[in-house]
Amino acid sequence: MSSIYICSVIESQNAMEFQDTKQVGSWGERTAQSFLEENGYTVLETNWRCSHKEVDIIAQKDSTVIFVEVKTRTTTFINPADAVNKQKQKLLLSAANYYVRRNKLDCDVRFDIISIIARNGSYTIEHIENAFYPKVQ
C-alpha cells in the first residue's frame, strides 16, 4: 500500500532559481533527505553508486532499509514519479541486492519514490512508500 504525503513550503525566490537540471536534481535530493530526516528516517547513504547504477538515498526506519529514488521537476507537464520506469526499477533492484549482500543485511527492504515539484517560489513533496514491488523471477 502506498502512502502519500504532500507538503507545501514557501522558499525564498532565490533558492528556487535553477540554472540547469543538475542543479534542480541536487536541490531536490537535499530537500528529500531533509524531509526524510524530519519524518524519523535515518539516512545511511546519499548518491550511492554501484557500477553504473545509483541510488539517490538509502535510508532506514525501524528495521526496514528503504531505497529512495528522488525525482524533481520545475513543471507539472509530467508527474516526476512517472519517470521511474521499469528499466529504472530494475537498476534500483540490482543496486539494492548488491547493497544488501555487501553489507550482510538481514532486514526488510522497501522501494520509495519522492517526487518534488518546485514552482513559483514554493515546492510540493509527494512521498510514495512501497512505490513498486520487484518481480520474483
Image (cartoon, helix red, strand yellow):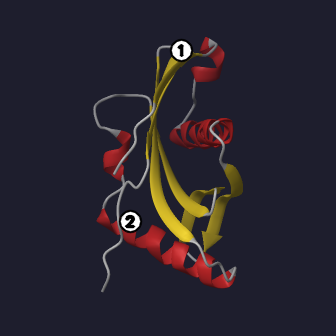
Q: Would residue 46 be seen by someone viewing this image from the given angle?
A: yes
Mark nearest the camera among 1 and 2 is 2
Picture layout, residue 81 above or below residue 10? below
- The residue pinned by badge 2 equals 89
Reading the image, the residue beneath label 1 is 121
Q: How many marks?
A: 2
Residue 124 vertical position relative to residue 29 in the rendered view, above or below: above
User: In the picture, which quadrant includes the C terminus?
Assistant: bottom left
Label ID, residue 97: none
Q: Residue at x 47, y 14 (%)?
A: 120
Q: Tell me the quarter of the picture where residue 29 sits.
A: top right
Q: Is residue 63 left or right of residue 89?
A: right
Mark 1 to mark 2 CA distance (whole Å)? 31 Å
For image coordinates 67% across by 35% down, the residue present is 38
Between 31 and 52, the one lying in front of the other is 31
Q: Viewer-proximal residue, 65 or 74?
A: 65
> Looking at numbered disc 2 in the image, what kind of residue is underneath it?
Gln
Quadrant of the rendered image containing residue 79: top left
| Secondary structure under the numbered disc 1 in the rendered image | loop
Q: Amino acid at mark 1?
A: Gly
Residue positioned 67% across, 83% down in the render: 102
Question: Which badge, 1 or 2, is on the more N-terminal residue?
Answer: 2
- Residue 50 locus on image (x, y percent): 61, 75
Residue 48 x/y as whole percent: 65, 64
Q: Could you say where residue 61 lies in the image, as x and y percent from the top left?
A: 62, 54
At mark 2, the secondary structure is helix
Front one among 49 and 35: 35
